[in-house]
Amino acid sequence: MVITFDDGNYDFYKRAFPLIKEFNFPVTVYLTTSYLQYKKPVFNIAAKYLLWKARSKTLDCKTLLGYGKQISLATENGRNWAYDLLFQHTLENEFSAEQKNDLLARMCGNLQIDYAEFCGKRIMQLMNAEEVAEIAAAGVDVQLHTHRHRVPLDEQLFRREIQDNRRAITNVAVNRATHFCYPSGKHDKRFFPWMQAEDLASATTCETALSTSETNRFLLPRLVDTCSLSEVEFEGWLTGISHFLPQR
């Protein structure tokens, strides 16, 4: 049994890694690497979090984006609307990581949130290269999760994600990564020959089941632990009993 962590968030390094060292758990981190050298919050998740944090306020899109209107962040629908506008703005204007960070900073100014303080807490940030090197040296297995946390349906772009991801991991963790985890669990059988061409040994999904000798090596299941998973359910999967019970 192996414990897996996706993305490589800083909170893994801060909270989980000390326990892993103490109890010597076997652990794999599926690392996305585009922010490895760019020590700022990941735009997508940071924007959603900051909009939620400012849920008592109103976002002035006209001031922030140059178009739109004021959006109340009091409801989930309002926050989703605001996020969709921000995300679409970055896509349409092909924003770089630096431009996305600038947009986050200006959004925080709009909402009267101290962005420098937010960044200083390393919230919604990934581990940096030095931290990844440290966990790898301590025995954590660092593996592939794409470079930009996406799985394009174009072969060239998909393979580029693997190549860029592997190169970045090799630079800091030394090992040649051959195991892959689909970002957000999004998989497609079209990926299989592309992964074979990149010499991948396996690919992990977010589907709950137990692996057997007949399991497709590019569709490995696992138990994803969430706040909604009860202790009884967790123990059921840990023992393997839940695999044989009807699933809701």
Image (cartoon, grey):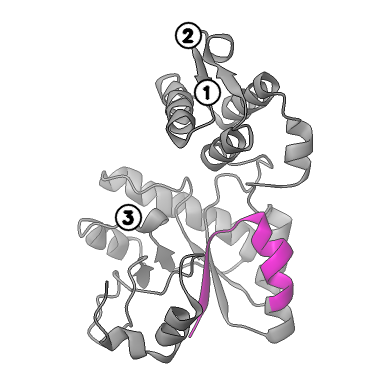
Q: Distance between the residues labelled 2 and 3?
A: 33 Å
Residue at point 37%, 68% (across, down)? 204
Which amino acid type corresponds to the residue marked 1 in the rendered image? Ser
Disc 2 packing (10 Å; few <14; some 14–19; many ≥20): few
Q: Foreground: 67 or 1?
A: 67
Which residue corresponds to mark 3?
Answer: 186
Residue, x 26% and y 76% (percent of image)? 247
User: Which tag is nearer the camera, tag 1 or tag 3?
Assistant: 1
Q: Residue 72 carries which label?
A: 1
Q: Is residue 246 visible?
A: yes
Left or right side of 71 for 214: left
Residue type highlighted by circle 2: Tyr
Query: Which kind of residue does numbered mark 3 sit on?
Result: Lys
Disc 2 is placed on an element classified as loop
Q: In the image, what residue occupies the spot 40% across and 20% down?
A: 92
* Labelled pair 2, 1 in contact (Cβ < 8 Å): no
Q: Position of residue 93 (x, y in %)?
A: 45, 19
Disc 1, disc 3: CB below 8 Å? no
**Is residue 17 magenta-colored?**
yes
Query: Tag 3, which secondary structure?
Result: loop
> Which residue occupies 62% across, 30% down?
56
Q: Tell me: residue 32, above or below residue 113.
A: below
Up/down of 224 relative to 79, above or below: below
Residue 212 visible? The answer is: no
- CB contact under 8 Å: marks 2 and 3: no
Indicate whether residue 5 is drawn in magenta: yes
Residue pointed to by mark 2? 67
Specify start and end residues of the magenta stretch as a single range: 1-19
